[in-house]
Amino acid sequence: MLRRPVASRMLISGAAALKTEAPHEARLQETAGYIAAQVGQHILAGNRGLLVANAAPGIGKLSAAATLGTSDGDPLDLAWIAERRDIVNQVAALGQYRPIAPCTRHTCPDGHPLHALLGERGYNTWSVHK
């Protein structure tokens, strides 16, 4: 069983903020690691439901969870859907994932018309690209 990190809220100013920066960073890393462990356990347990990792922005959730599918250690077979393509520039682990670009007239000039036609009708378009 994972132990959830203790979160605390502090309002700190001036020199006191510098003294607490290292412990604060450690708490952020601990929380991100906890979330990555939860994600890993969720996948390995075969859970097919949605897992919601609710934590403040900027703590490293994405960076920690993305390492689960990299070649370090025993990687999980993961796919990653990102809201922006440039996120790979911000999260080093995502650089080890294979990017898949959507089929457009720019990325697939020969297969795009057939791909669009099949997609509009709800058919799988993977065979167009083999």
Image (tube, rainbow, N blue to C red):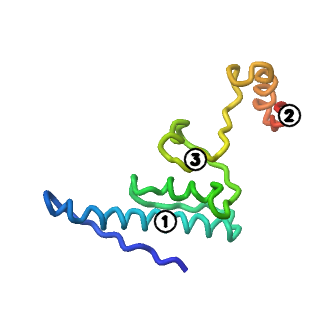
128 w.r.t. 38: above or below? above
Mark 2 vs 1, N-terminal side? 1
- The residue where tag 1 is placed is 33
- x, y percentage for residue 109? 75, 19
How far apart are the two marked residues, 2 and 1, measured between alpha carbons?
Answer: 39 Å
User: Residue pushed farthest left?
Assistant: 14
Q: In this view, does 123 lie to the left or right of 10?
A: right
Residue at image location 67% in from the left, 64% down from the top: 74
Q: Is residue 19 left or right of residue 36?
A: left
Mark 1 vs 3, N-terminal side? 1
User: Residue pushed farthest bottom?
Assistant: 1
- The residue where tag 2 is placed is 130
Pick whichever, 3 or 95, lies toward us.
95
User: Residue pushed farthest front?
Assistant: 72
Q: In this view, does 76 lie to the left or right of 130?
A: left
Pick whichever, 113 or 22, lies toward us.
22
Q: Do the residues labelled 2 and 1 touch (CB within 8 Å)?
A: no
How far apart are the two marked residues, 3 and 2, measured between alpha carbons?
Answer: 25 Å
**Amino acid identity at mark 2:** Lys
**Amino acid identity at mark 1:** Gly
- x, y percentage for residue 50? 61, 60
**Amino acid identity at mark 3:** Leu
Q: Do the residues labelled 3 and 2 touch (CB within 8 Å)?
A: no
